[in-house]
Image: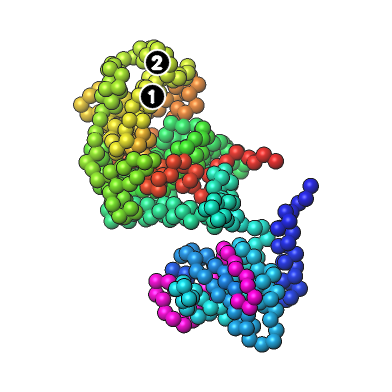
Amino acid sequence: MEKYTEQEKIRRQSLQELRSLGINPYPADEYKTNSNSQEIKEKYEEGKKVTIAGRIMSRRIMGKASFFEIKDMRGKIQIYLNRDELCPDDDKTLYNKVFKKHLDIGDIVGVEGGVFKTKVGEISVNAKKIKLLSKAIKPIPVVKTDLDGNTFDVFKNTELRYRQRELDLIVNEGSWQTFKRRTKIYNSIRSQLNKKNFLEVETPILQPVAGGAAARPFVTHHNSLDIPLYLRIANELYLKRLIVGGEEGVYEFAKDFRNEGMDKTHNPEFTMLELYVAYKDYNWMMEFVETLFKNILIDVCKTTKTIFNGKEINFQGPYKKIPFFEAIKKETGVDFLCKNEEEILSFCKSKNIETNKTMGRGKLLDSIFGHYCEKKLIQPTFITDYPKEMSPLTKSHRKTPGLTERFELFVDGKEIANAYSEQNDPIEQRKSFEEQAKLAEKGDDEAMLIDESFLTSLEYAMPPTSGIGIGIDRLTMLLTNSTSIQDVLFFPQMKPEKQ
């Protein structure tokens, strides 16, 4: 079986011939540029001397004059080559051999020359010098269009795009725009939080107790200490310990890891913004989140509206608020507030809602809500006042027994944010952890473990605090009209390739 394709063989041969001509195909020295494709076009100046660099994306080779197009991070620009201007003396090797025979689409080059317009008015650079900066020995896909307008070799296969993201970014114009918009989302959030004088912090990724969320962790082993450690499923407990330490507002953009299923909205490695603010409650946080999201939209999209999956989503606010049990009652006609675990399980079975023996009252209610309600929450909606069994880190509701001061923000049927009035009573928090331990004994591998360090921290007194977690990946999906989380991660987790 051939190791290389025919094109790869030709390019490797070109590599050797370039070296035999004394040309280093991978020079180490700095190449200083003074412009880029966008600047040249926006600030057009006839005859201006420029030095630019980029990747060759197309070529039109003629006799003594040729054109090629290079792409940099600002766009594309046409380069004009005249043999006698590029090689003013008798030695025409640079044009006849190097450019015409050994430079290929995908190669990275540096160009020095003057700016001009062609006869058809296209702004271009008349190259006086050209330097090979990096030789591509694998060909990149080149989109071709026939006389009937049919296109070929379009790099749209999603699996290949995810596995070879760098190639996707080279070939598909829109891919970089998605990730640049993701960066703008970070910048907008960070700017707003910093203006509030909240402190950005870092907390451990390797943790002795997998706490702060109900999820299955990745487990590893520390050889020197001879102890198990967990990749964090959430950074919540550490951030609240910093609130105990005296800071009144802390936040972190955290990489979290959960050893669970993968689908269009779940990746085992994902990014969360977590924010904790002292002397606030979940009512304050709802108002804050409305303002935060509205400003993100304005900063990133220049409007408070976005189109996702064919639907217009409006983040202007105010957002609708629906209590958890009211949402379920509206869709099922059943008031589950006072129903016990057996009654809820019976309902699930009668409606063919998937259950298992490890599920307690909280998970059963969550399944009913997911089955009947989530997909109908299109516009930004706060679902509030969750049952205690679903919220082990949350303060009990100040008016209604059995409920907690928690809300989740749903958009287009997906949870985007989760927030509480944080539990700061160490005795009540221990009781909640002990209830979680009972679920773990039943076989629930997502039940929270008891974190003694966190409980000790609460015993020193944590002020009334509200906290929120916002899914950055899902928010990016919404603001880039991406239907899969893999579209907004540079390198999503993939199944191993079949050999």
Q: In this view, does 62 lie above or below 203?
A: below
Q: In this view, does 329 lie above or below 251?
A: above
Q: Which residue is drawn at 45% across and 37% down?
A: 265
Residue occupied by mark 2: 351
Residue occupied by mark 1: 371
Q: What residue type is labelled 1?
A: His
Q: Is residue 63 magenta?
A: yes
Percent across and percent down for residue 71 are 52, 65
Query: Badge 2: few (under 14), some or many (20 or more) residues near its Cα, within 10 Å?
Result: few
Q: What residue type is labelled 2?
A: Lys
Task: Quadrant for residue 290, please give it.
Answer: top left
Picture disc at residue 382: none
| Frontmost residue, 155 versus 21 | 155
Q: What stretch is highlighted in magenta?
A: 39-65
Q: Can residue 198 be seen in this view?
A: no
Per the image, label 2 sits on a secondary structure element best described as loop
| Frontmost residue, 55 versus 459 | 55
